[in-house]
Amino acid sequence: MHQSPASRLSANRSRLGHKVRYALRHPGRVLPYLRRAGRDSWLRLRHRGNHVAYYRAVMASDTARSPEAAVGGGPSRDRWLAIGQMQYDYLVGHGLTPQDRMLEIGCGNLRAGWRFIQYLEAGHYYGIDISPDILIEAKKTLVGYGLQDRLPYLTPVEDLKLDFLPDAWFTVVHAHSVFSHSPVEVIDECLAHVGRVLAPGGFFDFTFDRTEGAEHQVLGEDFYYRTETLIRLAAKHGLVARFMDDWERLPHGQSKLRVTHPVPDRSPGPAVEAEMPTVEQ
Ligand SMILES: C[S@@+](CC[C@H](N)C(=O)[O-])C[C@H]1O[C@@H](n2cnc3c(N)ncnc32)[C@H](O)[C@@H]1O
């Protein structure tokens, strides 16, 4: 039995009632969920109060099992390819050109990244991730597709301050299925700093797990936000966020926001007239 889009958007997955109903609908998923919950509790305890360290440990454990599954969508190679293609097609459909300079936040094992690397001019792709394990897999993807001469940058990070990157450099910043795994402090940190590295006229697209009910999280791994929370957060850092309606038509459970610098108001204000020199009669 599938959930309707409306019930998906209002469900609170952290509630016991939701978990019981879900377990009754999907009895085969109960044992894997309990295993995951046990592992996550242990990792949370080990990395208490440090979400990035905790999530890095989750990624290390998931990547050791299956790099495809570690970036979401299950272990299927076809699904891995399809989700990468979806991201790529969407950006190219929105005007990505080979001359763009792209930063991918949470690039994983280059599910979409290898397509961007192939398409962009050499040296125009910069991927960052908190997980060294998944970046090692990213290198394998790069080698597998023979993309060495595209000279992408792949860099592990501790945080999203982006302090090692130049001002106003990236015309496109992309984060797919990263904020769906991020507490609000991480998103806030990213939005506080992304404006500095974003070129004038550039944009930052990110997906998130959307709820229209109460914001909640599950196992410290999956976070559900209301759209207006994230739009407000962007505004707090002087950025404008727009909901991308056309992404909703795609077969993907998350929603997408596009963040830009505000467009400067070019209308002549009264101050201009006031500064006009007065002509002596
Ligand atoms: C679900 S995977 C998606 C990977 C890739 N974007 C894709 O679509 O295949 C999320 C990735 O984001 C990374 N990640 C999570 N939190 C991050 C953070 N705060 N900064 C950078 N990367 C992060 C994870 O290590 C993981 O590789």
Image (cartoon, helix red, strand yellow):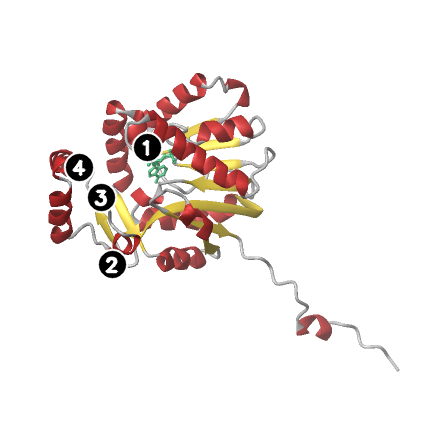
- Measure the alpha-carbon separation of dots 4 and 3: 8 Å
The answer to whether the residue labelled 2 contacts the one labelled 1, judged by CB atoms less than 8 Å apart, is: no
Name the side, left or right, on which 198 lies relative to 74: right
What residue is shown with label 2?
214
Name the side, left or right, on which 223 lies relative to 85: left
Q: Nearer the viewer, mark 4 or mark 1?
A: 1
- Measure the alpha-carbon separation of dots 4 and 1: 16 Å
The answer to whether the residue labelled 4 contacts the one labelled 3, judged by CB atoms less than 8 Å apart, is: yes
Farthest bottom residue in view = 281
Q: How many marks?
A: 4
Tell whether circle 1 marks a residue whose Cβ is less than 8 angstroms from ligand 1: yes
In this rendering, does residue 162 appear at all?
no
Looking at the rendered structure, the kind of residue marked 1 is Val
Name the side, left or right, on which 83 lies relative to 183: right
Q: Nearer the viewer, mark 2 or mark 3?
A: 2
Secondary structure found at label 3: loop
Q: In the rendering, which numbered label is found on residue 40?
A: 4
- Measure the alpha-carbon separation of dots 1 and 3: 16 Å
Q: Is residue 266 above or below residue 279?
A: above
The N terminus sits in image quarter: top left
Going 37% across and 56% down the picture, which residue do you hit? 227
What residue is shown with label 1?
71
